Image: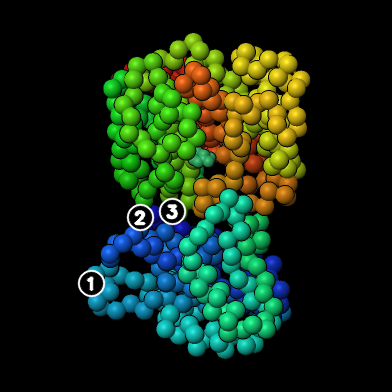
Amino acid sequence: MKYPPINKSLFINNRNKFLDRMKSKSVAFFNSNDLYPVSADTTLPFEQHRDIFYLSGINQEESVLLLLKNNNDTEEILFLKKPNELLTHWEGEKLSVKKAFTISGIKKVHWLEDLEKITKKIFRSVENIYINTNEHYRAKVVVETREDRFIRWVQKNYPNKNIEKSNPILQRLRAIKSPIEIKLIKKACEITEKGFRRVLNFVKPGVWEYEIEAEFSHEFLKNRSRKFAYQPIIASGKNSNILHYIENNKQCNEGEIILLDVGAEYANYGSDMTRTIPVSGRFSEKQKSVYNSVLHVKNEATKLLKPGILWKEHYNEVGKIMTSELLKLGLLRKSDVQNQTKENPAFKKYFTHGVSHNLGLDVHDYGDLDIPITKNMVFTVEPGIYIQKENFGIRLEDDVVVQQNGDPINLMESIPIEIEEIEFLMNSK
Ligand code: GLY
Ligand code: MN
Ligand code: MN
């Protein structure tokens, strides 16, 4: 891996928290992702399943983690692909038992070839089997994962066991970040900042969106990020009104703005930033007034992320602030607001997506949205105003950590966002 070792106490604590929430006489299992095929012998680059990573720090394909609980006795077993000379020659060194322990703190490490033998013995002695299904509120998965195949095998061979789900436990655990995780997310934000500062220096009329993408990529790879945390959105002119614009293939013209929704990955953790900048280095008056409204909403929305508030309540409160900005901008009339309904508030004409999502190992990270927000949850704050008839949209997005008392900590505090600073940096090459 590109990043320096992570303190294994992170993974040991994560397993202990999961084991605490398991019923007695139970086993839980977690699989690596498959290497997804493209065609012929081509595969996509390996992406570890975030749950097995969260519980072990193991980044290798074909790994399986088993957690067992019987009253106060617990056991952790890791299964790994057995290294051999040929594999080492083609792909490099695979994890040894010792190295796997150093990363994860797991003492019992077996080779994958023993998985069936060992699990058969274990599964017979337990009452409950925790399966790890994908229950994310935005997930739309049509392919069968390695985890799904394992679940199928378990259900076929042990039809009389009680089935429990790991996902509700993980949704709650992964939503609350430890100090080590916050540092890793902060590091991803710092790499994103380097990319953004490079881009401020680079953008001028005539550049192409993909050239800007390349500048970010250069800075990310140079700083031990493996890649973008998600498909980057480099959207100039009217493309800024397309929420998930990822073509990045238009030339940027004088007078247009560019919406940059870009974040670096670091050690499997994501960052998620949006900045909107003028191609020419100077915003127009109209762009400035919309920009400052969005910035105001973002700052107020951040302050509202306090322990106790529900995600949905937060959205509704931010909606009120957005409504007042849209009235000030003359984009909404009083009558629009008077005629709005609860299901269809007037602000949705210009602000068409959510305000905040959990951020962590996944960009749209785990988090049970029906439980109140608590300290050490990491959220994005990302209001936007999209004006189709003006051919531009503005969104601003920071990543913040909820505090027990006081305002959230902004992990993107030092990434330029005020109009004066953006213009200054773009004009001081
Ligand atoms: N970049 C994806 C998002 O902002 O949610
Ligand atoms: Mn984003
Ligand atoms: Mn986001």
Q: Position of residue 201 (x, y in %)?
A: 33, 25
Q: Residues within 10 Å of mark 3 (few under 14, many from 20)?
A: many
SS state under label 1: helix
Report whether 297 appears left or right of 423.
right
CB atoms of marks 1 and 3 within 8 Å: no
Q: Which residue is mark 1?
A: 89
Q: Which mark is residue 2?
A: 2
Mark 1 or 3 closer to N-term? 1
Distance from mark 2 CB to nearest ligand 1 atom below 8 Å: no
- Which of the 4 image quadrants contains residue 23? bottom right
Compare residues 103 and 314 and report the one nearer the observer.
314
| Residue found at the far top of this picture | 285
| The C terminus sits in image quarter | top left
Q: Which residue is mark 3?
A: 267
User: Going 66% across and 56% down the picture, which residue do you hit?
Assistant: 172
SS state under label 3: loop
Mark 1 or 2 closer to N-term? 2
User: Going 64% across and 87% down the picture, which residue do you hit?
Assistant: 125
